[in-house]
Image (cartoon, rainbow, N blue to C red):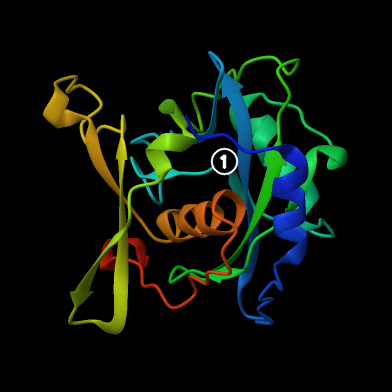
Amino acid sequence: MTSIDRTIATDRLAALERRVVDDPAARPAAVAIVISSQADRQGIWILRRPLTMRKHAAQFALPGGRLDPGEGVIDAALRELEEELGVTLHPDDVLGLLDDYPTRSGFLMTPVVCWSDEEVPPPTPSPAEVSELFFVPLDDLLDEPRFITIPESPRPVIQLRIPGLRRDPDDHSPSGRSALLHAPTAAVIYQFVEVVLRGRDTRVDGYEQPVFAWK
């Protein structure tokens, strides 16, 4: 069973020489990767957006969103976590940041890695922001990604298969629980696995998003 010590995770993030992207035209955003525990297993929260959303409807994502005016990435990630999942964490619960990831839709995404103790109440997702919420054990994040080519870009598209995530929310058969995650979410989670869980200096800014995520 895969687990990570808080001090080790913090040290590995501190050792990462973050790639910070300076793009005044991009809209800054932050996502939260929350290391939590459920039934004595560590994992992270991945959500599915509602079908009613104007953009990225029904897509898998991490909790997060754009920064408010004057807001920093840590404050934004914690605010979005509370608004979307009803989980209240504090700056002391932040372990560190991963690399900035520029998205094809014009956002500059900063992943904020957080720690949630067992004393933190379980999530109460907002129906306006979340149609389904999945607790994904760390073991289920360890499969190697696969890469495909597309004619629209010279960069490889990264895909992560996550056990327990369903393509069709109404299909509960074994074959229905095998969705693929794509960048930016797949890229961010892959760097989290490499840096935090494996202690590797892995970069993901060279990985492409599928065309459907460009808008």
Observer able to see residue 130: yes
* Most foreground residue, 55 or 72: 72
Find residue 92 and report its horizontal and vertical position in percent.
87, 39
Q: Which three-letter amino acid code belongs to the residue tagged 1?
A: Pro
Left or right position of 141 against 81: left
Observer able to see residue 48: no
* Most foreground residue, 53 or 87: 87
Find residue 152 and report its horizontal and vertical position in percent.
23, 81
Left or right position of 160 against 194: left
Identify the residue at the far bottom of this view. Answer: 154
Left or right position of 88 against 47: right
Label 1: which residue?
A: 63
Quadrant hosting residue 96: bottom right
Circle 1: element type: loop
* Most foreground residue, 157 or 72: 157
Quadrant hosting residue 97: bottom right
Q: Is residue 132 above or below residue 90?
A: above
Find residue 1 and report its horizontal and vertical position in percent.
47, 29
Q: Residues within 10 Å of mark 1 (few under 14, many from 20)?
A: many
At x 33%, y 55%, the residue is: 144
* Most foreground residue, 71 or 181: 181
At x 17%, y 23%, the residue is: 171
Find residue 57 and report its horizontal and vertical position in percent.
36, 44
At x 14%, y 21%, the residue is: 173
Quadrant hosting residue 147: bottom left
Q: Is residue 156 above or below residue 42?
A: below
